[in-house]
Image (cartoon, rainbow, N blue to C red):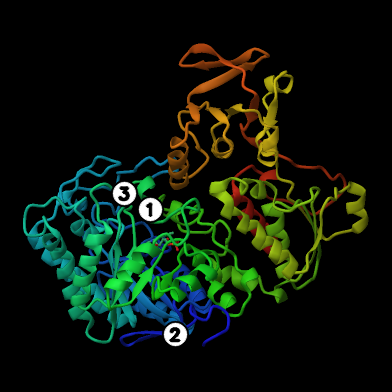
C-alpha cells in the first residue's frame, strides 16, 4: 500500500521471489525466550512476541540468531536449528508471522570465539560455560575479557561446520521461511575468519582477503545450494569493526562483491564486534551515539553493488528511515530496538499517527543488557514484551468490566505509566502533579546532552495521556480531605523519591546544591565543583558541568563509577567521562565539609581538598511516600515504594495498573 505518509518507506520492494510490502525490516535480535524446559525450541513467548511485530506493519522479520552447530555452546533461552525436531515449532512461528502480514527470514549462526559473551551486572565476565572443545575460533586467541584461549578450528571441522549451516538452511526452507540470513557480523565465526583482527591463521583460510574469505564463501556456497532458487539469501556483516587492525570499509566492499558473485541477494550492513561491553556499544549503540550512523557506509556499498543493501543501527524514527530510502542511503532499513519498544510503529507511521509511537531511546537496559546477563529480554518502556498473549487482551478498553474512578498522585514516569494503563482499560483517571511539568526525574535526566533522547519516553507518555483523555492537573498538591471528598475507587501513589543529603552537609557553610537543582539551574554553579557520589547521576552531572566549562572533581566511595548502571551503559559513560578532564577519586569517603575544605579519607589516609565554589550532592535517593490517613485502596508504585531506575518504575506501575 502506498501512502502519503513516508511514501518512500512504504514503497513495496522485490528481492528475487520475495515481495516486501515496505522497506522496514526487523533485524535479528536474540530474546532468550526459549523455554528452559525445552531448550532450543520455539516457545509460546516467541510466538506471541513475533506475531505482534508482524501485525505491527513491518515488511520483513529476520528471526533472531539461531544455532546451527550442536557442538557449540547454547545460549540459555536461545533457539536451535541443528536438528529436524526443531522444524515444527518454526513452522508454527512462520505461519503466525505470515498471518500477521510480514515476510520472514531466519538468521543462522555459529557464534565462534566471541559468542559466549556473558557478564554479570557489574560487567565481570563469566567464563564458567567456556568449556574445552566448545570454545573455538578462527585462531587460538584469548578472549579479551576472560583471557581464555579459543582452540583453532581444523580444516576438517570447517567442512563440518559448513555442512551444519547447509542443513539448517534446508530446515529453514522446510519450515516455510522466505529467506535465510547468514550471520557474518559482530565477531561471530564467519566474521572472525574474514577479519584480519581475529584471523591469524597461516593456512589457506588466513592471510590476505582471498584467504580470509575462503571459509565464509564456502559456507555461502553450501547454503545457496541448499536453498535453491525459492529462498532469498542475505548476508550480515560488520563492514567496519571499530577495532585496531579490524575490517574497514574498503575490504568490506571487496568482500561484498564476492558475496554478490556467489548468489547472496541482500547485503545487511552492520558494524562492531561483541567482544567487550565497550566494543559491543559499536554493534548495538547506546543513545549517546549518532542516529543513522552507518549511512555513510551503506551508501558506499549501495553504489558498489547491484544487490540491495539493508542498513541498521539507531534508525529510531520513521522520519530518518524515510530519509535513508529517499536519499538512496540504502534500499531497506532495519530498526531493531525501536520494534521492541513499539511493534506497531510502522503501522502508526503509515497512518500518520506519529505522536502515538513509543520511541525507543536506545537505552539497551531491558533488551541487550539483560540478554548478556542471560535473562529474557524486555524493554524499559514496554513491559508487554514477551508477554503479549497475556497483556494485550487485558489492555483492551472492554477489559475494565467496572469503570472505576482512579486518582494517580505524582506525574513522574511511574505515575504517567499507571495513568495511561488505567485509562487505556477504560477507567476514568485523574493525574495530579505538584510541579508545573510532567516527567519528574526522567525529564531532568534528559537535560544531559548524552541522554537527550530520554525525553522521548516522557513525550510519549504525555501524548498517551492526551490520547486517553486523562484529567491531568499540574501545580496541584493533594490533601487528605480533598482525596476523601472526591471518593475515588482506586488511588495510585507515585510520588517518587527525595535526594539523600548527608547530615554533615546540612549545616555546612559552603555552597551545597542537589544534583537535580544543578541540572535546572547551572547558572548558580561556581567554576570549581566537587560532586559527591559517582553513581550515574553524579557522572551525568559531571559531564553536564564539564560541557559548561566547569572544573569538576567526583568523589566516589566505591571502586567503580556508575555502579547502578548495567555493563553496556556503564562502559559508555566511563568512556565518555575519561575523554574529559573531570577528575575522579575512587574509594574515597568524605568525612566532613568545613569552611576551609573537604576532609576525605582514602586508603586509610586523611587529606583535605580545597573548598570548591560549589559542592553537588549525588549520593542517592530515598522513597518519598506521603501519608493519607483514613484513605483506602492505595497502591504505591515506583520510587516511592522502592527507589530504582526508570525501567523499574515503569514496570512496577504497569503491573499494578493492569490489574485494576
Ligand atoms: C536484544 C538484542 C539482541 C540481538 N541479537 C542479535 C542477533 O541474534 N544477531 C544479530 O546479528 N544481531 C543481534 N542484535 C543486533 C541487532 O540486530 C541490531 O543490529 C542492533 O540492535 C542495532 O540496531 P538498532 O539500533 O535498530 O537496535 C541484537 C540486538 C539486541 C538489542
Tell me the residue at 46%/76% (across/down).
Answer: 326
Dot 3 lies on which element?
Answer: loop
Q: Which residue is mark 2?
A: 12
Comparing labels 2 and 3, the label whose residue is closer to the camera: 2
Q: Can you tell me which quadrant of the image ligand 1 is in? A: bottom left
Up-down relation of residue 326 to residue 71 (above or below): below
Horizontal and vertical percent position of residue 91: 36, 80
Label 3 neighbour load within 10 Å: few <14, some 14-19, many 20+: many
Horizontal and vertical percent position of residue 10: 49, 81
Q: Nearer the viewer, residue 21 or 654?
A: 21
Q: Which residue is mark 3?
A: 275
The answer to whether mark 1 and mark 2 are in CB contact below 8 A is no
- Cα distance in 3D space between marks 3 and 1: 10 Å
Using the rendered image of the protein, determine whether residue 659 is visible from the camera's viewpoint.
no
Classify residue 378 as left or right of residue 70. Answer: right
Classify residue 256 as left or right of residue 14. Answer: left
Comparing labels 3 and 1, the label whose residue is closer to the camera: 1
Q: Nearer the viewer, residue 77 or 344?
A: 344
Of labels 1 and 2, earlier in sequence is 2
Q: Quadrant of residue 127?
A: top left
Q: Quadrant of residue 283?
A: bottom left
Q: Which residue is mark 1?
A: 282
Dot 2 lies on which element?
Answer: loop
Classify residue 505 as left or right of residue 648. Answer: right
Q: Quadrant of residue 571?
A: top left
Up-down relation of residue 454 to residue 622 (above or below): below
- Cα distance in 3D space between marks 1 and 2: 30 Å
Label 1 neighbour load within 10 Å: few <14, some 14-19, many 20+: many
Amino acid at each position: 500500500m502506498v501512502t502519503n505518509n513516508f511514501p518512500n518507506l512504504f514503497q513495496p520492494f522485490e528481492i528475487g521471489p520475495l515481495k516486501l510490502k515496505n522497506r522496514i525490516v526487523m533485524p535479528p535480535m536474540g530474546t532468550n525466550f526459549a523455554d528452559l524446559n525445552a531448550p532450543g525450541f520455539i516457545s509460546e513467548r516467541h510466538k506471541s512476541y513475533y506475531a505482534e511485530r508482524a501485525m505491527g506493519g513491518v515488511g520483513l522479520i529476520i528471526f533472531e540468531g539461531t544455532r546451527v552447530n550442536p557442538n557449540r555452546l547454547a545460549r540459555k533461552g536461545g533457539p536451535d536449528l541443528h536438528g529436524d525436531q526443531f522444524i515444527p515449532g518454526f513452522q508454527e512461528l512462520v505461519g503466525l508471522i505470515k498471518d500477521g502480514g510480514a515476510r520472514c527470514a531466519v538468521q543462522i549462526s555459529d557464534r565462534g570465539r566471541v559468542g559466549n559473551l556473558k557478564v554479570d551486572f557489574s560487567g565481570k565476565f563469566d567464563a564458567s560455560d567456556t568449556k574445552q572443545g566448545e570454545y573455538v575460533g578462527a585462531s587460538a586467541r584469548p578472549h579479551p575479557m576472560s583471557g581464555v584461549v579459543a582452540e583453532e578450528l581444523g580444516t576438517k571441522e570447517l567442512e563440518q561446520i559448513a555442512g551444519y549451516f547447509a542443513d539448517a538452511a534446508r530446515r529453514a526452507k522446510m519450515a516455510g521461511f522466505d529467506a535465510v540470513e547468514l550471520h557474518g557480523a559482530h565477531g561471530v565465526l564467519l566474521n572472525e575468519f574474514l577479519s584480519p583482527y581475529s584471523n591469524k591463521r597461516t593456512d589457506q583460510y588466513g592471510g590476505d582477503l582471498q584467504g580470509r574469505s575462503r571459509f565464509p564463501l564456502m559456507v555461502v556456497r553450501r547454503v545457496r545450494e541448499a536453498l535453491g532458487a525459492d529462498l532469498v539469501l542475505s548476508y550480515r556483516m560488520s563492514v567496519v569493526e571499530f577495532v585496531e587492525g579490524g575490517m574497514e570499509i574498503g575490504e568490506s566492499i571487496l568482500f561484498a562483491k564476492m558475496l554478490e558473485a556467489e548468489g547472496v541477494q541482500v547485503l545487511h550492513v552492520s558494524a562492531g564486534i561483541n567482544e567487550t561491553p565497550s566494543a559491543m556499544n559499536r554493534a548495538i549503540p547506546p543513545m549517546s551515539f549518532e542516529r543513522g550512523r552507518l549511512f555513510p557506509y551503506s551508501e558506499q556499498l549501495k553504489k558498489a553493488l547491484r544487490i540491495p543493501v539493508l542498513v541498521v543501527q539507531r534508525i529510531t524514527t520513521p522520519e530518518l528511515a524515510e530519509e535513508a530510502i529517499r536519499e538512496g542511503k540504502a534500499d531497506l532499513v532495519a530498526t531493531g530496538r525501536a520494534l521492541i519498544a513499539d511493534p506497531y510503529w510502522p503501522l502508526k507511521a503509515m497512518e500518520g499517527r506519529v505522536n502515538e509511537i513509543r520511541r525507543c531511546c536506545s537505552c539497551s537496559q531491558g533488551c541487550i543488557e539483560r540478554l548478556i546477563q542471560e535473562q529474557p529480554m524486555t524493554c524499559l518502556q514496554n513491559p508487554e514484551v514477551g508477554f503479549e498473549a497475556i497483556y494485550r487482551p487485558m489492555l483492551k478498553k472492554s477489559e475494565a468490566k467496572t469503570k472505576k474512578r482512579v486518582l494517580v498522585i505524582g506525574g513522574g514516569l511511574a505515575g504517567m505509566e499507571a495513568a495511561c494503563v488505567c485509562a487505556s482499560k477504560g477507567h476514568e483517571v485523574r493525574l495530579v502533579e505538584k510541579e508545573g511539568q510532567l516527567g519528574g526525574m526522567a525529564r531532568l535526566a534528559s537535560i544531559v546532552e548524552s541522554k537527550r533522547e530520554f525525553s522521548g519516553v516522557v513525550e510519549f507518555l504525555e501524548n498517551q495521556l492526551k490520547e486517553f483523555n486523562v484529567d491531568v492537573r499540574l501545580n496541584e498538591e493533594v490533601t487528605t480531605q480533598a482525596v476523601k471528598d472526591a471518593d475515588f475507587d482506586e488511588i495510585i501513589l507515585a510520588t517518587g523519591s527525595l535526594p539523600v543529603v548527608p547530615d554533615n552537609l546540612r549545616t555546612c557553610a559552603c555552597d551545597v546544591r542537589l544534583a537535580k537543582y544543578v541540572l535546572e539551574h547551572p547558572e548558580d554553579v561556581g567554576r570549581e565543583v566537587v560532586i559527591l557520589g559517582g553513581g550515574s547521576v553524579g557522572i551525568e552531572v559531571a559531564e553536564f558541568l564539564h560541557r559548561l566549562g566547569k572544573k569538576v572533581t567526583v568523589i566516589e566511595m566505591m571502586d567503580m563509577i556508575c555502579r547502578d548502571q548495567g555493563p553496556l551503559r556503564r562502559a559508555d559513560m566511563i568512556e565518555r567521562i575519561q575523554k574529559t578532564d573531570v577528575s575522579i577519586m575512587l574509594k574515597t569517603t568524605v568525612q566532613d565539609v568545613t569552611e576551609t575544605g573537604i576532609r576525605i579519607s582514602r586508603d586509610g589516609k586523611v587529606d583535605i581538598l580545597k573548598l570548591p565554589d560549589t559542592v553537588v550532592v549525588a549520593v542517592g535517593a530515598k522513597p518519598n511516600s506521603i501519608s493519607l490517613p483514613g484513605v483506602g485502596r492505595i497502591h504505591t508504585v515506583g520510587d516511592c515504594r522502592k527507589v530504582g531506575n526508570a525501567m523499574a518504575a515503569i514496570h512496577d506501575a504497569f503491573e499494578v495498573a493492569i490489574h485494576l
